[in-house]
Image: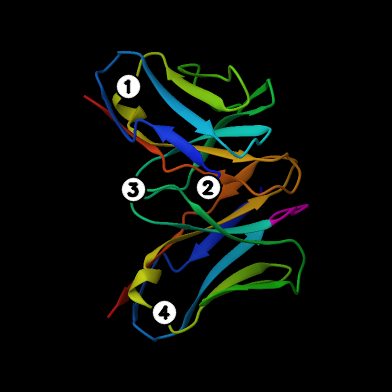
Amino acid sequence: EDQVTQSPEALRLQEGESSSLNCSYTVSGLRGLFWYRQDPGKGPEFLFTLYSAGEEKEKERLKATLTKKESFLHITAPKPEDSATYLCAWRSNDYKLSFGAGTTVTVRA
Amino acid sequence: DAMVIQNPRYQVTQFGKPVTLSCSQTLNHNVMYWYQQKSSQAPKLLFHYYDKDFNNEADTPDNFQSRRPNTSFCFLDIRSPGLGDAAMYLCATSLGLAQETQYFGPGTRLLVL
């Protein structure tokens, strides 16, 4: 059965303390691994799409990487405004996006 | 700015009273999706429209239905809301199906009394 596991469930960081979030997957025929950011009471905001092992993408303090079994979202020198829940999602057929449970990141000033 | 708009942002209904949630988009995307997200859980796909073609997920309750009268608008109808239907309902769009990014609206928080 296709499955994605995000870890940790929650992450508390001091401002400037870099860290990584993990999304491990056992999905046959992966057709894209997506990262979204979700603020409380709002819809998910698209961050990155990764399609093949070795691919990396960056946006400001965020960098997403993909291997054959997992994806990492690295947060470099985070600021309080980076506090959010980060969701990874995968596509294994032509349309369905399936989400992990998310990692809630809290960055303290 | 092109976007996905959901109305209302908050909806309160009574147990068993039909309710309709609205989604509109200015992206001119072909595909529109409805997700249900309960507190601290992952969004769960209910159904999607590719143009006028409706696709229901196998585990979506019959209580949930959808209409797409034109490219820009899509509605979620809950015929007889139960307490377990209280959730955030998210609308998303994508240009196509295969390998296309989905863009989400802000969501409608539904409370069932």
Subunit ID for the residue under disc 3: A
Q: Are marks 1 and 2 on the same chain?
A: yes
The span from disc 3 to disc 4 (Cα, nearest Å) is 22 Å
Question: On the image, numbered disc 2 is attached to which residue?
Answer: B1
The span from disc 3 to disc 2 (Cα, nearest Å) is 21 Å
Q: Which mark is residue A78?
A: 4
What residue is at 70 percent from the left and 54 percent from the top?
A27
Q: Viewed as shown, does residue B23 lie left or right of A95?
A: left
The span from disc 4 to disc 2 (Cα, nearest Å) is 28 Å
Question: Few, some or many C-alpha atoms within 10 Å of disc 3 (few <14, some 14-19, many ≥20)?
Answer: few
Subunit ID for the residue under disc 1: B
Q: Viewed as shown, does residue B6 lie left or right of B86?
A: right
Of marks 3 and 4, which one's residue comes earlier in the chain? 3
Q: Are marks 3 and 4 on the same chain?
A: yes
The span from disc 3 to disc 1 (Cα, nearest Å) is 21 Å
Q: Secondary structure at mark 3?
A: loop
Q: Horizontal and vertical percent for residue B52?
A: 68, 20
**Which stretch appears magenta?**
A27-32
Name the amino acid, label 4.
Answer: Pro
Tell me whether the residue at label 3 lies in contact with that at label 4, contact meaning CB atoms closer than 8 angstroms. Answer: no
Q: Are marks 3 and 1 on the same chain?
A: no
Question: On the image, numbered disc 3 is attached to which residue?
Answer: A41
Question: On the image, numbered disc 1 is attached to which residue?
Answer: B82
